[in-house]
Image (spheres, rainbow, N blue to C red):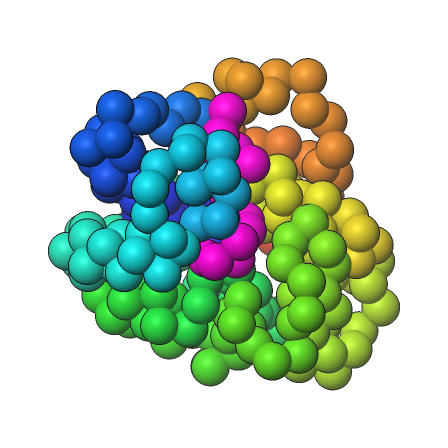
Amino acid sequence: MPSSSGHRTHLHGTEILARYGKTYGWELKSRLMGCRDREAAEILIRETGISMTADEYLSERTVKQESLFAFAKPLPGVLSLIKHLKDTNIPIIVATSSCRATFLLKAKNNHALFSLFDNNIVCGDDPKITRGKPAPDIFHVARERLGSPPANNCLVFEDAINGVEAAKNAEMNVIWVPHPALAAIHKDYFGATETLTSLEHFDPRKYGLPPFPDDEE
């Protein structure tokens, strides 16, 4: 689920790389977004050539995340949408490439949001997931947890292109809500069912979902 923590994570990755005289731009970040933690670390190290192991990078990043996630908040429209889906009995689940320990750090100060999912959480280190995004594994597991509804009845919200591709590979509908910097370098990407600049612009009626109360006639 899109949140304000992603950009701060990017900034702290930049801090680590700066010690080695390396930079970390959105071209590389776009390749890492949606990957599982270790996969992302391995790609980052390979592409930048820094002299760290994946374990060393992840250990340092985790320490930095502990402070930054205290300030992570859902982006505009996220909480109201999830509350609406919960109130109208639409099954919902989180499918995040982050390992469970990282997810719990992020969720710690966002109880109002994540409590709505009733522990329907699938993380990237789930033993049933053998491949990370853009492979569809995580969404197959999430769909199974919800009772295996038809894939074309599932709607995914993603901020990462790897996540969009994973949802498509799972034959699900997917709405892409990218960071403006990510959208700028992928302005010709049309892989999602719909692209929005904010979830505040989401219209559930387009997908056969109950309308927001203010939209009811």
Q: What stretch is highlighted in magenta?
A: 27-39
From the viewer's perspective, is 25 left or right of 210? Answer: left
Q: Which of 157 and 96 is in front in this view?
A: 96
Q: Position of residue 195 (x, y in %)?
A: 63, 32
Q: In this view, does 82 lie above or below 111?
A: above
Q: Where is residue 177 in the image (x, y as percent from the top left)?
A: 53, 37
From the viewer's perspective, is 25 left or right of 122? Answer: left
Residue 44 visible in the picture: yes
Q: Is residue 56 above or below residue 162?
A: below
From the viewer's perspective, is 162 left or right of 46? Answer: right
Q: Which of 177 and 27 is in front in this view?
A: 27
The residue located at (37%, 48%) in the rendering is 3
Majority secondary structure of magenta residues:
helix
Q: Nearer the viewer, residue 143 or 29?
A: 29
Residue 11 visible in the picture: no
Q: Is residue 204 above or below residue 66?
A: above
The residue located at (35%, 65%) in the rendering is 102
What is the quadrant of residue 110 in the picture?
A: bottom left
What is the quadrant of residue 15 in the picture?
A: top left
From the viewer's perspective, is 61 left or right of 123? Answer: left
Q: Which of 63 and 116 is in front in this view?
A: 63
Q: Would you say residue 155 sits in the magenta stretch?
A: no
